[in-house]
Amino acid sequence: MNRIGRALAASLLLLLAAAAATAHEGSTSYLELSDGRPEITGRLDVALIDVAASIPIDTDADRRLTWDEVWGNRDPIARELASAFEFSRDGTPCTVQVAEPWLTQRLGLPYLSFDISARCPKAGALAVASSLFFDSDESHRVLVALDSGSTTSYGTLSPIAREWAAPASDSAWSTALAFIGHGIWHVWIGYDHLLFLLLLLLPAVAARGADTAGRGRAIALDLVRIVTAFTLAHSITLGLAAAGLVRLPQQPVEAAIAASIVLAALLNFFPGWWRMRLPLAFGFGLVHGFGFANALAGLGAGAAPLPVLAGFNVGVELANLAAIAVALPVLLHLSRRGWYATRALPALSLAAAAVGAAWLVDRL
């Protein structure tokens, strides 16, 4: 193995090691607003685990939260959340108030819900800014839905886009474009989705043809079939789940995604079974679709509107294609070496199986 080959292989192994440090789902808060002019009212839902990580409410330090601990700290929690949001109309700040919390669930996880209101001294276009958990969690997102009576507008707040302004008119295109970025981000922090896709690519570049052109055609055909099956499958369940027709709790979905990584990795050790990657890509693509849909769950009235769903799905596909475009040249270079199929492919698959198994244990 030459120096360049060792460096490339080491880089891929380090990538797998880095992926082991994180789970798939970034944390999400939900802000649903109604513009009553001049007052804005609504509801804020934040994950209990995010609140506990940001505000010291575990008073007995036993790492177990009780409702008494939450209720006993309701005032500092409300103050912290109120200070994390800024509402304004035409640049004039509004006064924000957050009421006492109650306990609810989203995707099987405990959330705290708060009535939130803002009184604005002026009329005009509404803007919402937030710093909620952004300084301590770069993966956190706030999904915003604003009901203006005749229309509902949607947006996202993140560490790199901390302000959102309601559009002057309802625009499906602007909504879709905003959620393309959300879809791209969701895949790029979703190391489990990327790892599963990489495992499906590893055997593809081991194809052998009579000549370079024949090998290239075999690789291209294999990639097209695998990626198409994965895309079609996760698009189906993403659409069904985001439309509110089918919905699964987050924890079993995330555990099944981790299991898909282990199975795909083990499959790579048996060349005679590589033909099973196509049904594997489709079958587990259905599961991954539920994982993607969980990023939109609870936005608005429960069913994500078409522009949100379309933009998010396009963002997911763009991120998938970008990941393939980055990984494929590296894998093609490695596959030209005689040791790729016998040493590099098993080593990478074994590392990925270990990462997937660690995720599976953690999520169960």
Image (cartoon, rainbow, N blue to C red):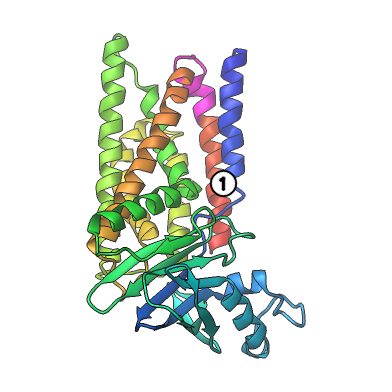
Quadrant in the picture for residue 228: top left
Residue at 67 percent across and 83 percent down: it is: 76
Q: Quadrant of the N terminus?
A: top right
In the rendered view, does 306 fall on the left or right side of 81? Answer: left
Q: Is residue 336 magenta?
A: yes
How far across and down, in percent of the image, does residue 158 sit?
50, 58
- Name, please, the residue furthest toward the right: 60
How far across and down, in percent of the image, does residue 7 sit?
61, 22
In the rendered view, does 107 fall on the left or right side of 84? Answer: left
Q: Along the line of sight, which residue is nearer the eye, 243 or 258?
A: 243
Magenta stretch, overall SS: helix
Q: Is residue 186 magenta?
A: no
Q: Is residue 337 above or below residue 88?
A: above
Residue at 57 percent across and 65 percent down: it is: 131
Q: Is residue 295 visible?
A: no
Residue at 59 percent across and 70 percent down: it is: 50
Quadrant in the picture for residue 257: bottom left
How far across and down, in percent of the image, does residue 254 sit?
46, 60
Residue under numbered circle 1: 355
Q: Is residue 177 above or below residue 121?
A: above
Q: Is residue 352 visible?
A: yes
Quadrant in the picture for residue 66: bottom right
In the rendered view, does 3 fall on the left or right side of 149? Answer: right
Q: What amino acid is found at the position of numbered circle 1 in the picture?
A: Val
Segment tinted magenta in the rendering: 335-345
Residue at 44 percent across and 52 percent down: it is: 186
Q: Tag 1: Cα neighbours inside 10 Å, few (<14), some, or many (≥20)? A: many
Q: Along the line of sight, which residue is nearer the eye, 5 or 146?
A: 146
